[in-house]
């Protein structure tokens, strides 16, 4: 019995640990804080181990990132309710007016630009994106997931992934071009 | 009017094209449109530049060592512990080899029975499993490299006298693969030199062992493999030595590594 459990844990370690950096990176960009990200990842790994029996093989990275993502959202609901309140779960970002209003609230891109050099500027712009756009962009550009994988992680249709990604890039570009033409 | 519809449709395809998500037919239509629409061409160039800038300059944060250690400790607390009985003063190398020596007997017995019972291909799979396991074991703290030097002229002599063959050590940093160091390991009961490289945040272990089919010269490498755990493995044989490159690096980049190595 104990041996079986040890084997299961070893199998879990082999599935999950290769994606530990990806898990941390996602948590880090969602929470925007290194300490909070570590907490989220630790909690997510516990959940993942618990749910591992239900993992039927296949894409271990998407599976783990979905758990990290949900853990991060739960964590923010508990610790930063204001931030999560602005989040639109099924929203595609098609309502231009809404985006204009929430896009850089609390962290103005101008401020991010002034605060920062070139790399810091891009970091700041990503951090200023609303959650639903930020997670798409990070999963695509930094974790190099396909649309299908991103859809699986976030739990929305592929079409929604496409429009959120387009919006995320549009918002990024706006801040970025501002800097270039300065 | 028709042109207008095409144009609007293509604007929506820009991102999918950039992300490699278009099928061949749509990609052809997309390229045809770009060739006579300066507006879309310019927008596509801007999006590509933004995407490239993000990938190049924005950090992909790596898990802190303390977090990794804490998780490893809770998941496999005893895996890394060496046996207690040590007749000689234990050097770092001996500590390393001792658990592997236990695996040696088991590995040899397993290999012997496998050789009788099943085809070469399955033996190859067993070797693949074995190098992946060794790679994962090595990712545990303190086990990655026994010699931590990024200069090929120092890594190469380090192997002298420790194994009975001379693994070539190559400098590939100009192709984005930085030499980190080396260590010794056992793969299926066989001594292996491991040369460790790093690509961005990904570690690559290159296992080198004496080949079974020594003298038969270079052989075409089998197709690259992805293990269920998500590691990629590239295998090739050259000059009487077997090579396995193992990493969580994506398939294409690991294939580039194998090519870069063999190209020199």
Image (spheres, grey):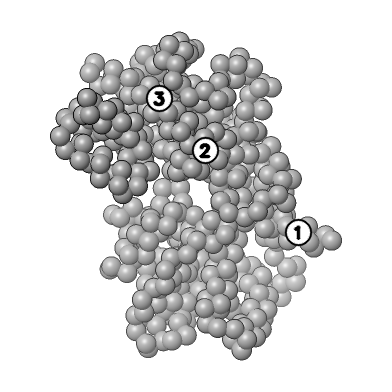
Looking at the picture, tell me which residue is in the foreground, B89 or B133. B133
**Relative vertical location of residue B71 with respect to residue A109 in this rendering, above or below:** below
Question: How far across and how far down the image is residue A99, in percent?
Answer: 44, 15
Residue, disc 1: A6
Q: CA distance from mark 1 to mark 2?
A: 33 Å
Q: Residue at x 73, y 57 (%)?
A: A8
Looking at the rendered structure, the secondary structure element under dot 2 is helix
| Among the two numbered marks 3 and 2 on one chain, the one whose residue lies closer to the N terminus | 2
Residue, disc 3: A167
**Relative vertical location of residue A106 with respect to residue A5 in this rendering, above or below:** above
Quadrant hosting residue B81 = bottom right
Q: Residue at x 36, y 38 (%)?
A: B16
Q: Quadrant of the C terminus of chain B?
A: bottom left
| Among the two numbered marks 1 and 3 on one chain, the one whose residue lies closer to the N terminus | 1
Question: How far across and how far down the image is residue B195, in percent?
Answer: 44, 65
For label 1, the crowd category at 10 Å Cα-Cα, with few meaning under 14, some 14 to 19 and many 20 or more, is few
Q: CA distance from mark 3 to mark 2?
A: 16 Å
Along the horizontal axis of the image, is B98 left or right of B186? right
Residue B174 in view of the camera: yes
Looking at the rendered structure, the secondary structure element under dot 3 is helix
């Amino acid at each position: 019995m104990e041996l079986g459990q040890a084997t299961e844990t070893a199998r879990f370690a082999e599935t999950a640990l290769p994606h530990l950096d990806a898990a941390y990176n996602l948590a880090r960009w969602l929470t925007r804080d290194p300490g909070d990200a570590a907490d989220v990842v630790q909690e997510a790994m516990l959940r993942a181990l618990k749910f591992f029996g239900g993992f039927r093989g296949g894409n271990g990275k998407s599976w783990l990132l979905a758990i990290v993502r949900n853990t991060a959202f739960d964590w923010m609901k508990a610790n930063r309710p204001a931030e999560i309140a602005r989040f639109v779960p099924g929203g595609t970002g098609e309502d231009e007016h809404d985006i204009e209003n929430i896009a850089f609230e609390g962290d103005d891109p101008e401020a991010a630009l002034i605060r920062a050099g070139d790399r810091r500027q891009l970091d700041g712009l990503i951090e200023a994106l609303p959650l639903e756009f930020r997670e798409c962009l990070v999963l695509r550009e930094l974790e190099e997931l396909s649309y299908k994988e991103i859809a699986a992680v976030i739990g929305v249709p592929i079409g929604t992934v496409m429009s959120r990604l387009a919006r995320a890039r549009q918002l990024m570009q706006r801040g970025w071009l501002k800097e270039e033409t300065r | 009017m028709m042109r207008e519809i095409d144009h609007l449709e293509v604007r929506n395809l820009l991102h999918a094209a950039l992300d490699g998500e278009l099928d061949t037919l749509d990609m052809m239509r997309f390229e045809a449109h770009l060739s006579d629409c300066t507006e879309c061409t310019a927008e596509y160039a801007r999006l590509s530049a933004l995407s490239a800038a993000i990938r190049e300059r924005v950090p992909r944060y790596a898990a802190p060592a303390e977090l990794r250690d804490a998780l490893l400790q809770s998941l496999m607390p005893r895996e890394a512990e060496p046996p207690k009985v040590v007749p000689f003063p234990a050097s770092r190398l001996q500590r390393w080899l001792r658990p592997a020596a236990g695996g040696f007997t088991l590995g040899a017995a397993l290999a012997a029975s496998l050789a009788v019972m099943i085809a070469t291909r399955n033996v190859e799979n067993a070797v693949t499993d074995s190098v992946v396991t060794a790679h994962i074991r090595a990712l545990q703290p303190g086990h990655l490299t026994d010699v931590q030097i990024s200069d090929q002229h120092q890594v190469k002599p380090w192997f002298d006298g420790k194994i009975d063959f001379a693994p070539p050590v190559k400098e590939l940093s100009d192709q984005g693969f930085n030499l980190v160091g080396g260590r010794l390991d056992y793969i299926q009961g066989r001594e292996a030199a491991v040369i460790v490289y790093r690509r961005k945040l990904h570690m690559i272990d290159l296992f080198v062992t004496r080949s079974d089919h020594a003298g038969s010269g270079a052989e075409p490498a089998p197709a690259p493999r992805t293990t269920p755990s998500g590691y990629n493995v590239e295998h090739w044989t050259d000059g009487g030595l077997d090579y396995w490159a193992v990493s969580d690096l994506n398939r294409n980049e690991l294939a580039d590594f194998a090519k870069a190595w063999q190209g020199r």
